[in-house]
Image (cartoon, rainbow, N blue to C red):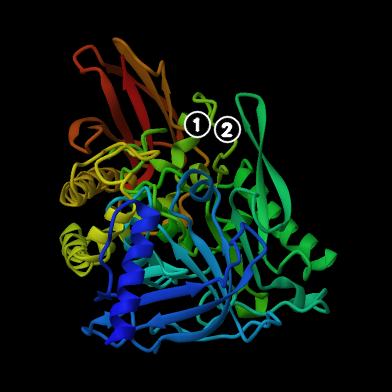
Amino acid sequence: MKSYYTFFLLFVLKVGSSLGQNISFSTSNLPILKVNTNGKTIYNEPKILADMEIIYNGVGKINAITDKPTGYLGKTGIEFRGSTSQQLFPKKPYGIELWVDSTEKSRKVALLGMPEESDWVLNTSYNDKTLMRDVLSYDIANRMGRYATRTRYCEMVINNNYEGLYILMEKIKKDKNRVDISTLKLTDNTGDDVTGGYILKIDKTEGSKSKMWNTTLTIDGINYIIPIQIEYPKITDITDAQFNYIKNYVTEFEMSLKGSDYLTPKAKWRDMIDIDSFVDYFLITEFNKNVDGYRLSTFFYKDKDSKGGKLKMGPAWDYNLAFGNADYLEGYKTTGWQYKINDLAVPAKDTYFLSPTWWERLSVDSTFRYRASKRWEVLRKSALNPDRINAWMDSTANTLNESKVRNFSRWTGVLGKYVWPNYYVGATYEQETTWMKDWIRQRTAWLDAQLKVFGSPLANEVEIVNKFQLKIFPNPTDTETTIEYEVTKKGRAKINLYDFTGKLLKTLLDEDKNANIYQIKLNSENLSSGMYIVDYQLDDIHVESMRMMKK
């Protein structure tokens, strides 16, 4: 009687002393993760030795703070992680590595039903008041058939202080159950050995040092730098030959994609990438319109040539600023393409983090457009179905019913208050989730219209010779504009005008044409001010779409 009552009373008092109020926490329907640093202070790095317990009695069972730890009992190294979240917010994210003992030797353990590994992340979702954006995005990616980090909600206690709701997550890492690519040894420097595997990223350069190089982006005559970092192998484990190989491979891909012949069927980049992985990454990023999409937390990888060897996009990572949760660079809008983020970032002088030109170049390729359009049709019935997502959100909210109340009591400066960079600030948790659902509904409707125009069924995909240029001038237009188009082979040319919701307004041309360059005039006097889409097809095969602005 004394042990339980005394522990519980001391626990409540300790929590209360750190918060200025009492938070009753003795049981949870979620796993309970406890860390004891034995008086040591947690730093950004290096990790410090601590004791860790996970109390989890199974699905549907209640976990008590005094229960025996069945999920994990042992040593861990713990440190702060993250860049912006660590600097701005009082609730800190953590990186943990499971250790055998004080020698800091790592050990792999399966935590809460996730495949065994030593490295894990404890995410806060501090400025995401739904507590769902990251978890939902990874769930969507996994349902798309792509590996994304597995997650488990838990409640965390550090040194007997209740720290709130956390998300235990897999760290992106080379592993048979994570990014399943070949191990690179220091002796793998020639032939097939040197061709894989590599994990790369476009991200902030704070944190652990990586081997890296800079790619250059030129906009309006100004050169900008985008660092490409090698996440695996680590900086201490990569040879010069390996670094030069992967740098040259990615550079060759970029040069081919920038080349004047990149739209032709024989363009080299087509054989260098797994285009379906690029399509899926494009669709999930456009769907949740992560304001950091393509320019930060962007991972890609390559295995050995003997195992496929093409550059693949993913895994998906870091979506707390997705689904409208950003008040800058139009991250809150349900309209607009995220792959055009540079068009907003450069005028706003937010040029420290820019997207490479890959996505804008791919967006005009007929094969990429066709596959993105058709893949969207499939995913809209499954992973990207708003009704399914609403049901998932309702179920998750129900699971978090009690823990979210404790979390927002612990962190009183969150719910109902602006936390950078929120666009919407709801007074209640329910208002936050309702707003997010409505944002997803509107975003889906916009993408439905755009991707219908984006690509139409192609009979021969890349067999179209795409050397044409579709031009609109002047653009923006006031009273009249000229549309110039090239017919590369004899066929029936069709040009349609759509509003920005995808509604067909007028067929401007539907005629048989010989191979040549032609012009047609468009009287735009009667059009309302705003954005329009001019769509060009040849023999019912989509060729190109361009935006037209009416003043």
357, 518: nearer the viewer: 357
Residue 247 position by quadrant: bottom right
The secondary element bearing badge 2 is classed as: loop
508, 234: nearer the viewer: 234
**Compared with residue 7, is residue 16 higher up or lower down, i.e. above or below?**
above
Residue 97 seen by the camera = yes
> What's under tag 2, amino acid-wise?
Thr
**Which label was assigned to residue 345?**
1
Could you say where residue 75 lies in the image, as x and y percent from the top left?
57, 81
Mark 1 vs mark 2, CA separation in Å:
6 Å
Residue 114 position by quadrant: bottom left
> Viewed as shown, does residue 180 lie left or right of 550?
right
357, 532: nearer the viewer: 357
Label 1 CA crowd tier, 10 Å (few <14, some 14–19, many 20+): some
Could you say where residue 397 lies in the image, as x and y percent from the top left?
20, 63
> Viewed as shown, does residue 550 lie left or right of 297?
left
**Compared with residue 343, is residue 430 higher up or lower down, i.e. above or below?**
below
> Viewed as shown, does residue 22 lie left or right of 467?
left
Tags 1 and 2 touching, CB below 8 Å? yes
Could you say where residue 155 lies in the image, as x and y percent from the top left?
35, 69
Q: Nearer the N terminus, badge 1 or badge 2?
A: 1
Q: Which residue is mark 2?
A: 351
Could you say where residue 66 lies in the image, as x and y percent from the top left?
34, 83
x 17%, y 60%: residue? 390
The secondary element bearing badge 1 is classed as: helix
Q: Residue furthest front?
A: 2
545, 290: nearer the viewer: 290
Q: Quadrant of the C terminus?
A: top left
> What's under tag 1, amino acid-wise?
Ala
Label 2 CA crowd tier, 10 Å (few <14, some 14–19, many 20+): some
Residue 143 seen by the camera = no
**Compared with residue 152, is residue 550 higher up or lower down, i.e. above or below?**
above
